[in-house]
Image: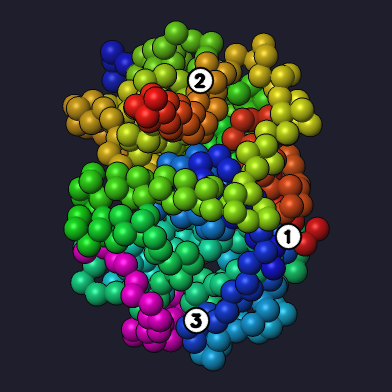
Amino acid sequence: MQAMVYRGPYKIRVEEKDVPRIEHPNDAIIKVTLAAICGSDLHLYHGLMPDTRVGHTFGHEFIGVVHEVGSSVQNLQVGDRVMVPFNIYCGSCFYCARGLYSNCHNVNPNATAVGGIYGYSHTTGGYDGGQAEYVRVPFADVGPAKIPEWLSDEDAVLCTDALATGYFGAQLADIEQGDVVAVFGAGPVGLYAAASAWLMGAGRVIVIDHLDYRLEKARTFAHAETRNFAEFDDIVVEMKKTTGWLGADRVIDAAGAEADGNFRQVLTGTKLKLQGGSPVALNWAIDSVRKGGTVSVVGAYGPVPNMVKFGDALNKGLTIRGNQTPTKRQWPRLLSHIQNGYLNPSGIVTHRIPLEHIAEGYHMFSAKLDGCIKTLVEPGA
Amino acid sequence: MTYTADHPPLPETPDQLRARIPGWGADLDHADRPAFPRERFDPAASGAHWDFPDRQPEHVPRERSIEHGMLPPVFGTAQPLHGVSGAVRRYAYRRFGEGRSAHWLLLIGADRIDATGAHLRSFATLRPDNPVTETGVLSEARRHGWSSRVGRHRADVKHQWLDPVVVAGPWVVAGALGWAALRAVRKRRS
């Protein structure tokens, strides 16, 4: 089969690999019909995530058709059209029994601080991902779900992470009616978080980024106010000023490790890998939120320590909440919102590329070329 | 206002927001949000039909964090440890817990060893690494690299010049050191 493979920082190519095989009775092999490149894939691509091995296939956003099932699989049959949450989880450990599917303890030997994720280095378990023609899906009775007939492939693939994570980010922010919500990062997760904040009753939603084309999308897609931080000497002061000097009630960090805006943090965090990414957005979130407010963190960071302004967080009495999204817990509500026309996942898709062009797709996304917001990948196209 | 008891006024009322934004307020009730409460003990909800999963066979010894009490029952088998990078990774897993920076920095170091070894080995194959196609840099021409950056107030333009330095820099330094070493050997012989 053809699969995207990592060759080292900033270098990937498509190679022939063996079709994955059943390794556990509850495995399924999925033939991928549509995948996506996630913003967090860039952390791997840039060599930021420890234990990213040459030959690894990225991709944790994908849908497909069941190609083969293990002997204990009861809920799926060959030929089923399925969406697969980006989390790999057993469904029965201490954490899964409590609904913390993204924190499963039974699928990742390499680390206890993070659960299993498809195609996201050995730090999340060493599973090849879905930017390939086939992928091994463990615990097929627990993770994947059949895609409703009315749901398009594009909308379905975006439910596997980006939409669910954006919505979860708004949820983690504990939004009350009338809250002023600031979202740092106008990438896919930030746009979905902004759109979701309204569903939870936000009184005002402000999206901050430095890419004008993404801020334009925040205005049209997410109905949000926007600020380009590159146009302000200090975006935190602007946030105070625009909120009557209070600060936002809730702030969502949807940028994560690749955040821009401070050369020292970018150099040490994303270029030299001396931090688990550049925590610019997180520090701005801490400083922009009002005292007693909530900071929701759904932008991904690596496990290396970061230079975070924790003193400010303490002194302001903040609640900081974060997690990888327990994706499948979000799906029933998300599907309902899509059906009702409240959320339109595919509204942010800007590019569709065949798998064989994936190296150019990654560069385009990484360098923010051609108005790129979300790129879908078609294996076998 | 901030210096008095009231929240600063909002530009729109709930009715105005409801009229402007499809679905505004549909999830107002915290208790009716999907991941609420965050921890809810309900083992049957996941669809798992086991108390503890069958164990996946361990065909080759699988490295694991020393913060795990045992090898978890299911694990990825992609890219097993090999060579020098494998030895460094094995040491990082065996010696240091996840709370130690040494654990992660060794793993990042092993990643670079892995990549360097793979690049060198590729030159002995029919498909050597090609930095032009593998970095996707050709999309600069096809995807409007110039107009996507110039005059756009982009913060990342200030440091994107570092990317080629980070990618190619170690190769240039290694080449320069190799050249210097070669010259030194020649000088000593002559």
Which secondary structure, mark 2? Answer: loop
Label 1 and label 3: CA atoms lie apart by 23 Å
Mark linked to residue B159: 2
| Residue for point 29% across, 48% down | B106
Membership of B48 in magenta stretch: yes
| Residue for point 38% across, 77% down | B60
Q: Position of residue A89 (x, y in %)?
A: 43, 69
Label 3 and label 2: CA atoms lie apart by 44 Å
Q: Amino acid at mark 3?
A: Glu
Residue carrying label 3: A23
Quadrant position of the C terminus of chain B in the picture? top left
Label 1 and label 2: CA atoms lie apart by 33 Å
Q: Amino acid at mark 1?
A: Pro
Q: Position of residue B82 (x, y in %)?
A: 40, 63
Q: Mark 1 vs mark 3: which is more N-terminal?
A: 3
Chief secondary structure of the magenta portion: loop
